[in-house]
Amino acid sequence: MKNLLSLSVVLPAYNEAENIGLTIASAVKYLSDRQICYEIIVVNDGSIDATPAIVTDLAKQNPQIRLVNHHRNLGYGSALRSGFDRALHEYIFLTDGDGQFDISDLDRFLPYIQDREGNLLSKIVIGYRAKRADLFIRSVNAWLYHIFIQWVLGIKARDIDCAFKLFPRHIYQSIKPIKSDGALFSAEFLSKLEHFLLREPSLSPIVELPVQHFPRRFGKATGANIKVILKMFWECWQLKKECNEENQIQLKPGTLSGINHIRS
C-alpha cells in the first residue's frame, strides 16, 4: 500500500502583505491537487503591515494553515527555527513567502523521497537557483557571501541560501540546535547536515536540483541591511569556533562531501 506523503510547508514572512496571500494560495492548490497531506506554517517575523491579518483570515478558511507570530522582528534564522520546530509532518519543505519560487518545482523533488512502491525515503533534496533573478548588486553580494561561507565553513552546497529545501523532520531533529537567528541559519543548517551525514553512512547524500527563481513582484528584500550583514559575520565567527572545538571527522579516501550534485 502506498504511503501518504505528509508535508509541513514553512513560509517565513516579513512585511509580505502583497505576496503572502498568493504564495499560500499557490501552495494550497499544488498540495491539494497532488493529494498530499499538508500543513502550511507561516512565520510572521514581526511584520508591521497586514501580513498577520491576511494569514489569520486564510487560516479561518483552511485549518491546515497555521500562523506563528513573532511580536518583533527576530531575524530570518529565528523565523525558520520557529517554523521547523513546530512542524508536525514527516517532511519539512522550506520556501519563502515572497513568491520568488514556484512550488510546482517540487514535482522534480518528490521522486527522490518516495520510491515506485510508495515507500518514503529519508533523503534530503535542496534546490539551487538555475538563474538568479535578483538585481545585479544583490547577486554580486550573494556570490561574495557564498565564496566567504564556503571558505570559512567548507560547505559544498552549490546555493547555500536557496529557499527551496525538502528534508525529513527527524533529520532536522537530529542536528538541532541551529543557533543562528539571522542570515547564517541556512549555512549552519547545511554545515551540521553535512557533518551528520558523514557520521551516518547508511543515509543517502544530499541531492541538489535546479529550481526556477523569479523577480520579486512586491515589497522590498531586507537581506542587504548592514545590521543583517554584520550579525552574519559575528554568527559565522562563533560557528567557526564551535566547529573547531568539535572532534574532526576523518573522511574515507576518495570521499569529498555529503552532497551528490544532480543536474538536469
Image (cartoon, grey):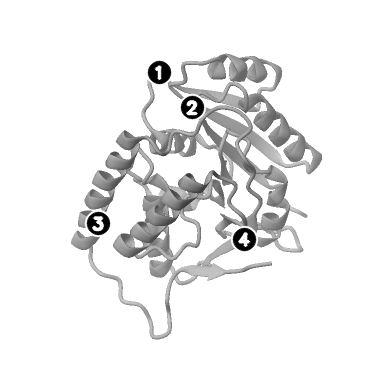
- N-term mark: 2 or 3: 2
Q: Residue at x 69, y 28 (%)?
A: 22
Tell me the distance, in whole angstroms, between the alpha carbons under discs 1 and 4: 35 Å
Tell me the distance, in whole angstroms, between the alpha carbons under discs 4 and 2: 27 Å
Q: Which residue is mark 4?
A: 209
- N-term mark: 1 or 4: 1
Q: Which residue is mark 1?
A: 71
Residue 240 circle label: 3
Query: What SS does tag 4 mark?
Result: strand
Q: Which residue is mark 2?
A: 14
Q: Residue at x 45, y 38 (%)?
A: 80
Tell me the distance, in whole angstroms, between the alpha carbons under discs 3 and 1: 31 Å
Q: Is residue 181 visible in this depiction of the protein?
A: no
* Amino acid on which the number 1 mark rests in the picture: His
Residue farthest toward the right in the current orientation of the protein: 33
* Amino acid on which the number 2 mark rests in the picture: Tyr
- N-term mark: 3 or 4: 4
Query: Residue 128: image x %, image y %?
Result: 57, 56
* Amino acid on which the number 4 mark rests in the picture: Leu
Q: Is residue 35 visible in this depiction of the protein?
A: yes
Query: What SS does tag 1 mark?
Result: loop
Q: Quadrant of the N terminus?
A: bottom right
